[in-house]
Image (spheres, rainbow, N blue to C red):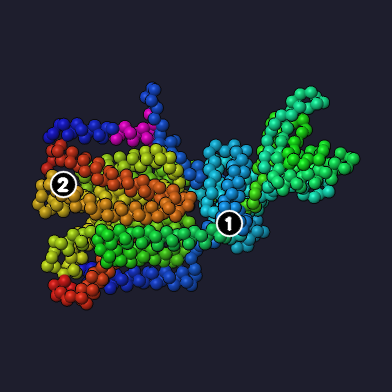
């Protein structure tokens, strides 16, 4: 018996136990608080519930022109989404013509899709029904203050600025409208999605492309109108080509069921390793626990999103981690059978098994990298967890299992090779 | 067990499954999910089991061919799948009809998904491309670490595993959807991982057993690694089977091909990859320099 080694071993068990406990339940140590891993993990839409929509631009534009339009469309969609008040929206360009919008935790999903997907354009229409300018002609739309002479105080107004084409068209239209005596015939209706959002009366010919909409606005109303005008200026029609709405209950059920399944799966693996390999099995279980902590830690640190396929990827990488242990232990068994002492068997077994483990994992790693590079959405999530898992499994197999195994041999509790699975 | 001598039996077993699968796939087609064909999925929670015929009363107004499945622990949910491209307005209209008839609240709309027809084609192209790139990458690595013939044999075993997985999809009509792609790629990774361990042992034994024939080397290498192959597959299967039993629908779609792939991967690394390597090795040495000890 070697008490120093036993103390170190027990200390490691205690530390791993403590970290596992705090990862599962969280710990509160006065000033320091460790929240459970589950709460720190960024969850994908399929686990948290929410909406994603992929919109495709209906345009023949290419190259720089398309790029510009897409950037513009993205900015406008961001504005629309901001209006929804979603905590962490994710809006990305996918490929050249697509925009992917992810809205975690959105409750009234259908409304959200409606607002985001609105493809109709903003139009300025004269009383005869002619379209004067459209949203794409608007360069600027914002709230400013202007003196109201009647009331004698500053009042919020919406200031607009048109582009070159818009300036010309707007000048022509206002020149015509101002000829009408009746103020009703001088109205320009601002229409968004067949809905009149403002109906200012033209008070003069506007030739410089800078118009101001007045009308006794409150700051709130003015900024809403300014935003609507900005948001209506979608430069290209967007079509909804892919949608996914996951209700919050489904997401929660998926997460709970997966965690439950993962727990049972892990317990079975732990039991199998313990029964089949005995002392090394116990070491493997300890190593696997450290492995899982490493993976969870890495995922939280890298801010990786956990998705349903991601959970499957995690479980698969646990399988790979077990594989590394199995390869090593089988090798050690062979060495013991060949008549080597325990210590020598562990050393040479490790050395020989290591090459196999590295070759096997590198090939899987190549597949994982390809998945990450070419996959989208959930497949990417799967690849990330698989890659993190592979790296972590190498680290545990190469360093941790080896160290622990040598430590147990040093502890000198038993020389019975049967307890080492032989 | 003399695996090399019985190699033709093992080839035949695999070939039979693959041929049956391919014939099934050609005759009745694969059961493509809506993310491959384009279409719409709606899942509604009724709180109790509703007969399919009642659901049809409403869905028939939209699509007479819509497929209707029960889901949830007590079959209280219904999944409606249609190949129609229903936009947000249509989806809401359908839900509202159910909502009115069964007095549901908004929360009952568990999920809805829509895939445009172009998405499926893209997923397929991308999947095929990823498999090819991953395969080439692995072939290069194995050639670099081992030799080209090991690489080729590993890739054949890998194609074997993918074909077996596809056959199971065809025979059991398992839906082919986007998680299927991730599953196939995982099988590719697993298959190689498993095969490498056996090849690694063959490579090692070639150096030790200089006087022996390839047949003996391969047989011995397999018998030395078979416990590890089985134990590894067993533990990985444990985790995935549990996930299949307790997981939600989306996970089940993913877990099933993995289960099949892992079994096929283990089988092929023992009974397919090594015999193929043996064939490649002996044929060439037959032709180039005849060595009576090595055949």
Callout 2: SS: helix
Q: Position of residue A39 (x, y in %)?
A: 44, 35
For the point 30% across and 52% down, the residue is A361
Residue mark closest to the camera, 1 vs 2: 1
Marks 1 and 2 sit apart, C-alpha to C-alpha, by: 62 Å
Residue placed most toward the observer, A23 or B97? A23
Q: Which class describes the residues within 10 Å of circle 2: few (<14), some (14-19), or many (20+)?
A: some
The quarter of the picture where the N terminus of chain A appears is top left
Residue placed most toward the observer, B57 or A350? A350
Determine if marks 1 and 2 fall on one subunit.
Answer: yes
Q: Position of residue A45 (x, y in %)?
A: 51, 45
Q: Is residue A115 visible?
A: yes
Determine if the magenta segment contains residue A304.
no
For the point 39% across and 72% down, the residue is B19
Q: Chain of mark 2?
A: A
Residue extent of the magenta highlight: A16-27
Q: Main secondary structure of the magenta part?
A: helix
Q: Specify whether B11 is left or right of A105.
A: left
Circles 1 and 2 in contact, beta carbons < 8 Å:
no
Determine if the magenta segment contains residue A23.
yes
- Per the rendering, the mark at residue A62 is 1
Q: Position of residue A225 (x, y in %)?
A: 70, 37
State the image quarter where residue A289 is shown: top left
Q: Which class describes the residues within 10 Å of circle 1: few (<14), some (14-19), or many (20+)?
A: few
- Residue that badge 2 annotates: A347
Q: Position of residue A327 (x, y in %)?
A: 23, 52
Q: Specify whether A216 is left or right of A179.
A: left
Q: Give the residue at the far right of this rendering.
A: A181
Q: Chain of mark 1?
A: A
For the point 15% across and 74% down, the residue is B291
Instruction: Specify which label sits upstream in the sequence, 1 or 2.
Output: 1
């Amino acid at each position: 018996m070697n008490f120093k080694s036993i103390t170190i071993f027990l200390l490691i068990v205690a530390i791993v136990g403590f970290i596992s406990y705090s990862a599962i339940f969280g710990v509160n140590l006065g000033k320091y608080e460790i929240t459970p891993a589950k709460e720190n993990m960024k969850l994908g839409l399929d686990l948290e519930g929410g909406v994603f929509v992929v919109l495709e631009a209906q345009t023949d534009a290419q190259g720089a022109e398309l790029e510009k339009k897409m950037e513009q469309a993205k900015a406008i969609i961001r504005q629309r989404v901001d209006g929804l008040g979603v905590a962490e929206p994710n809006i990305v360009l996918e490929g050249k013509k697509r925009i992917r919008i992810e809205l975690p935790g959105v409750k009234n999903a259908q409304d959200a899709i409606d607002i985001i997907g609105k493809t109709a354009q903003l139009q300025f229409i004269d009383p005869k029904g002619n379209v004067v300018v459209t949203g794409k002609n608007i360069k600027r739309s914002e709230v400013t203050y202007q003196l109201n002479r009647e009331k004698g105080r500053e009042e919020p107004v919406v200031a607009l600025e048109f582009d070159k084409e818009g300036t010309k068209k707007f000048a022509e239209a206002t020149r015509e409208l101002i000829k009408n005596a009746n103020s009703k015939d001088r109205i320009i209706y601002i229409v968004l999605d067949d809905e009149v959002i403002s109906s200012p009366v033209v008070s003069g010919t506007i030739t410089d492309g800078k118009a101001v909409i007045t009308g006794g606005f409150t700051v709130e109303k003015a900024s809403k109108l300014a935003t609507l005008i900005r948001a209506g200026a979608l430069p290209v029609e967007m079509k909804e080509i892919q949608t996914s709405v996951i209700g919050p209950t489904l997401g929660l059920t998926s997460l709970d069921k997966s965690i439950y399944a993962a727990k049972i799966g892990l317990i079975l693996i732990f039991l199998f390793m313990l029964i089949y390999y005995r002392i090394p099995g116990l070491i493997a279980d300890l190593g696997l626990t450290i492995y899982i902590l490493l993976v969870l830690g890495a995922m939280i640190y890298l801010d990786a999103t956990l998705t349903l396929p991601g959970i499957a990827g995690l479980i698969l990488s646990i399988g790979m981690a077990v594989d590394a242990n199995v390869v090593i232990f089988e090798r050690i068994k062979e060495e013991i059978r060949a008549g080597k002492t325990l210590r020598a068997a562990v050393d040479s077994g490790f050395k020989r098994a290591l090459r196999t483990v590295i070759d096997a994992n590198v090939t899987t790693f190549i597949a994982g990298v390809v998945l990450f590079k070419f996959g989208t959405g959930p497949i990417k999530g799967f690849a990330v967890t698989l890659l993190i898992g592979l790296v972590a499994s190498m680290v545990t197999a190469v360093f941790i299992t080896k160290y622990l195994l040598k430590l147990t041999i040093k502890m000198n509790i038993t020389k019975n090779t049967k307890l080492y699975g032989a | 067990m003399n695996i090399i001598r019985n190699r033709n039996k093992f080839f035949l077993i695999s070939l039979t499954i693959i041929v049956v699968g391919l014939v099934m796939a050609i005759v009745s087609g694969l059961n493509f999910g809506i993310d491959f064909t384009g279409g719409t999925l709606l899942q509604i929670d009724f709180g109790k089991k509703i007969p399919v015929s009642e659901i049809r009363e409403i869905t028939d107004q939209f699509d007479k061919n819509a497929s209707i499945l029960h889901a949830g622990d007590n079959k209280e949910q219904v999944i409606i799948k249609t190949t129609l491209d229903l936009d947000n307005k249509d989806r809401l209209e359908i839900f509202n009809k159910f909502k009115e008839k069964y007095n549901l609240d908004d929360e009952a709309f568990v999920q809805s998904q829509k895939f445009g027809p172009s998405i499926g084609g893209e997923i397929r192209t991308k999947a095929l491309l990823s498999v090819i790139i991953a395969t080439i990458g692995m072939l290069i690595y194995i050639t670099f670490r081992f030799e080209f013939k090991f690489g080729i044999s590993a890739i054949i075993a890998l194609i074997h595993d993918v074909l077996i997985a596809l056959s199971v999809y065809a025979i059991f009509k398992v839906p082919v959807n986007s998680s299927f792609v991730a599953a196939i790629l995982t099988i590719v990774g697993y298959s190689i991982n498993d095969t490498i361990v056996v090849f690694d042992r063959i490579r090692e034994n070639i150096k030790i057993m200089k006087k022996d024939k390839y047949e003996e080397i391969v047989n011995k290498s397999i018998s030395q690694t078979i416990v590890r192959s089985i134990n590894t597959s067993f533990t990985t299967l444990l985790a995935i089977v549990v996930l299949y039993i307790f997981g939600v629908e989306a996970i089940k779609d993913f877990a099933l091909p993995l289960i099949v792939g892992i079994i096929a991967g283990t089988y092929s690394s023992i009974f397919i990859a090594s015999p193929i390597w043996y064939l490649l090795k002996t044929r060439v040495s037959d032709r180039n320099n005849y060595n009576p000890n090595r055949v």
